[in-house]
Image (spheres, rainbow, N blue to C red):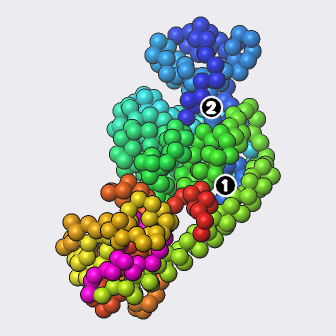
Amino acid sequence: MDTIGDCAINTDCFELGGIVDMKGEPFPFFQPIVDVSRLTVAGYEALARSRDDDGAVISLGPVFSDPSIDRNTLREIDRSIRRQAIERLSACSDDTFLSLNISPEWMHYVGVGDAVPTIEMVREAGLDPQRIVIEIVESSGDHTSMQRLLDRYRQEGMRIAIDDFGAGHSDMRRLVALEPDIIKLDMMLLKRAMAGGVLQDVLHSISQLAQRNGCDLLCEGVENEEELRFALDHGARFLQGYYLWQPQAELIDADEPAARLNPFLRQYMDDKVHVERVRQRFTEGVEQYLIALCSLIEEGRIALGALPTTPQGLIRFYICRTDGFQESPNYEPRSGVGAGGGEGVGAKAEDTWRVDPSTIGHNRCSRPYFHQVLARIKPQMSPVRSSIYRDIASGQLCQTLGVMVSDNRILFADFSYFSDQQLAELEV
């Protein structure tokens, strides 16, 4: 979506009854969309541009959000830019796609059985409709007309993208109604999620949602290497932003991203491999700790004074019976212990551990990892790991590990899930 106000627009060049005069004639710019899996230009987003009195190129984004400008005039400008962009792409021999922003506001102008302007433009240009992506840019408008037109676009062979997903415009309703091929992440969500916390959880959920629904995730507004890395970490296939390419008048060679991204991807892979090795060493230490705990468990009771040094990240551990009921308290290391510190010479167990009996009798059988532990053919196999989730009590991202202790007891332990950056800083 063209939300970048490159500079203020001079609306004096617009006539409310018709198209822009020749001095301010609108035209498309094209911002490359990179397919990171193929290292090619996958497509372009067509963005509305014009020139000011000095001849400088300016964005028309502010014009389309200006309620003082006649809507019929804006619709004609929009169609003019779409036609020019389609004609430009039709002259390009590769298989790149063109992403066209179409406001639901325009859709009510097309009645049942009427010719659809974009479809007619594509046919006239002789362009394969599969190379067109219809990008829905707002949540307002006539939803009945919008759904009807989206069905016609699909019947023609075009793809559908939801823009600004995660910005709060009834996203789940839009996802269900539109069944998009591409989810275009709200650029501000990407930037704010980098600070961590709940917004990063939201971004992770959107990534998982896209994968489960067979949608490609597109991250726009990528402005630096850190944002590029963050987008890849969260499963983006398509990337768009000023760090890669600014909007421009000309289409570029489809293979240009390879030369630009290959050095970055080599470093990205090296960094990931290094962190994964640290994570594996951390995991081995955690598993050894659980084995040591298992050997100390007698009749569901823990000898706190005999516990081994607490590993970094331990939040709590507890014991459940195989029928799902928790039979032990939660054993939680006090501040400084679960962060890798030892219990200390001469320290009393009650000084280093908090024993919380409030969860005795709770049933854990509905948790997926509980079934996975019981399903293990060989109990001595490595512990089962849950998916990553946010612990309610501590507010930390964590994983639960589970291992059979005996025929009727299971040991569970909740550990903090460290980010790549946190893990790289640990002494494992």
Quarter occupied by residue 347? bottom left
Left or right of residue 410, residue 258 in this image: right
Return the mark for residue 47.
2
Callout 1 amino acid: Val
Is residue 23 magenta-colored? no
What's drawn in magenta, residue-wise? Answer: 299-317
- Give the image location of residue 328, x and y in percent: 25, 76
Q: Quadrant of the C terminus?
A: bottom right
Of the pair 359 and 189, the residue shown nearer to us: 359
Mark 1 packing: few (<14 Cα in 10 Å), some, or many (20+)?
some
**Quick one: label 1 or label 2, which is nearer the N terminus?**
1
Return the mark for residue 387.
none
Q: Residue at x 45, y 29 (%)?
A: 106
Of the pair 361 and 200, the residue shown nearer to us: 361
> From what the image shows, is residue 363 above or below residue 213?
below
> From what the image shows, is residue 277 above or below residue 136?
below
Left or right of residue 193, residue 351 in this image: left
- Give the image location of residue 309, x and y in percent: 47, 74
Q: Residue at x 38, y 62 (%)?
A: 334
> From what the image shows, is residue 46 above or below residue 301?
above
Callout 2 amino acid: Leu
- Give the image location of residue 84, x and y in percent: 66, 31
Q: Quadrant of the N terminus?
A: top right
Is residue 245 something one can see in this rendering?
yes
Q: Residue at x 39, y 38 (%)?
A: 169
Return the mark for residue 36.
1
Is residue 307 magenta-colored? yes
Front position among marks 1 and 2 = 1
Q: Main secondary structure of the magenta part?
A: loop
